[in-house]
Image: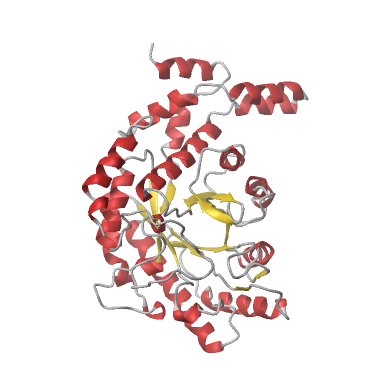
Amino acid sequence: MGLYETAREQYAAVGVDTNRALALLAEIPVSVHCWQGDDVMGFEGATQLTGGILATGNYPGRARNVKELRADVETAFGLIPGRKRFNLHAMYLDHGGAPVDRDAIEPQHFASWIEWARGQGVALDFNPTFFSHAKSADGFTLAHRDAGIRDFWIEHGRRCRTVAAHIGRELGSACRDNFWIPDGWKDHPADRLEHRALLVDALDRIFAEKLDPAHTLDAVESKLFGIGSETYVVGSHEFYLAYALSRNVVLTLDAGHFHPTESVAEKISALLPFVPRLLLHVSRPVRWDSDHVVLFDDETRAIMREIARPNAWDRVDIALDFFDASINRIAAWVIGTRATMKAILAALLEPREQVLAAEREGRLADRLGLLEEAKLLPIGAVWDEFCRRSETPTGGDWMREVASYERAVLAKRT
């Protein structure tokens, strides 16, 4: 009997069907982010990353153009099992050598990305880019006091929605269009409400046109603090929670955008009764830095459990958001995405029915005991089976392929 068959029997003994779990895992998409491949620089010719964002490290081999980024992503995709989406920022447009400002982007600038996605068999998600631009240099965009600057960014937001709707229509899958802005102050502002009132008005103007939710879904993302906005961020969690509830848009929870003692997992069940759906940006916060490569750790597993227990996969979208320039960037993609999918699998393999029955019958010691014993069930054998069914490497075999690609491709980039 093989390892998977032995594991299948052990899980069956506690009421878990591993084949069903694997079938479910194969249908849950994870949106892999483009910006890990090039340290969030984009393809507009930027030489400096601004907006409270910092990619640390200088590992060789960063993608420098659309062609290189796509080659790197395809290599990573070949090492990641399961269903994937690909998440673009507006600054990754394919402008063909003719620079386009943010308030002038059009669907044509992403036509080649759509064709590439078709070839890869993936859907695309999207993000307006409100940083690394001359008109964001003082730390404010949609909440800027200057109406001219504010109007520039409002037009950018409108055009991004048009692009996202076009992407979703072309690929037949709703494109998640996520709005995050860096606006805030390093020290105490004289008037916190002023900028928030400006932001409400700007967002309302951006979202005024009603778009088909079958093509695109608008989302808003909060942050606790950033570099240069340590004291005050206009788009706080409370601000965007209220905005999402009152405007019926998707709320985004980034795992690295809260205080280290806060649990994003705990927020999921608290919000689902009220918001239409949630978008997750899964990352790994370490002290002040919110964007380390995702691991198969307690918090990531807790997040996925909170989706699995109420079976809310159809209401929570999972995307990744980390960027590590200190290690091989393709390895970072593979490690982080595979870890996220392992956490999903762990949640699907939990003996949910038995645990719920114990809780409802008041057998609370059994509830605790079942959850503890489940931790030692052979998830590794089930994960390897998923990789085999997906025709991707099992265990650490993917590392040899990354090393080979580094020698053949990345090492030749200057």
- Say whether residue 9 is left or right of residue 312: left
Which residue appears farthest toward the top when viewing the image?
Answer: 1
- x and y percent of residue 384 in the render? 39, 27
User: Residue visible at 56% across and 56% down?
Assistant: 289
Q: Is 413 placed above or below 353 here? A: below
Please indicate, yes or no, whether residue 81 appears anywhere in the rendered image.
Answer: yes
Q: Quadrant of the C terminus?
A: bottom left
- Say whether residue 69 is left or right of residue 9: left
For the residue pair 205 and 103, the one nearer the viewer reads as 103
Q: Quadrant of the N terminus?
A: top left
Which residue appears farthest toward the right when viewing the image?
Answer: 362
Asked where in the image residue 383 lies, by quadrant, the reply is top left
User: Residue visible at 50% across and 45% down?
Assistant: 294
Asked where in the image residue 14 lies, by quadrant, the reply is top right
For the residue pair 18 and 338, the one nearer the viewer reads as 338
Label count reads 0
- x and y percent of residue 202 in the render? 57, 78
Which color scheme is applied?
A: secondary structure
Please indicate, yes or no, whether residue 19 appears anywhere in the rendered image.
Answer: no
- x and y percent of residue 212 in the render? 46, 65
- x and y percent of residue 93 in the render? 33, 68
For the residue pair 257 and 238, the one nearer the viewer reads as 257
Q: Is 122 placed above or below 354 here? A: below
User: Residue visible at 69% across and 49% down?
Assistant: 261
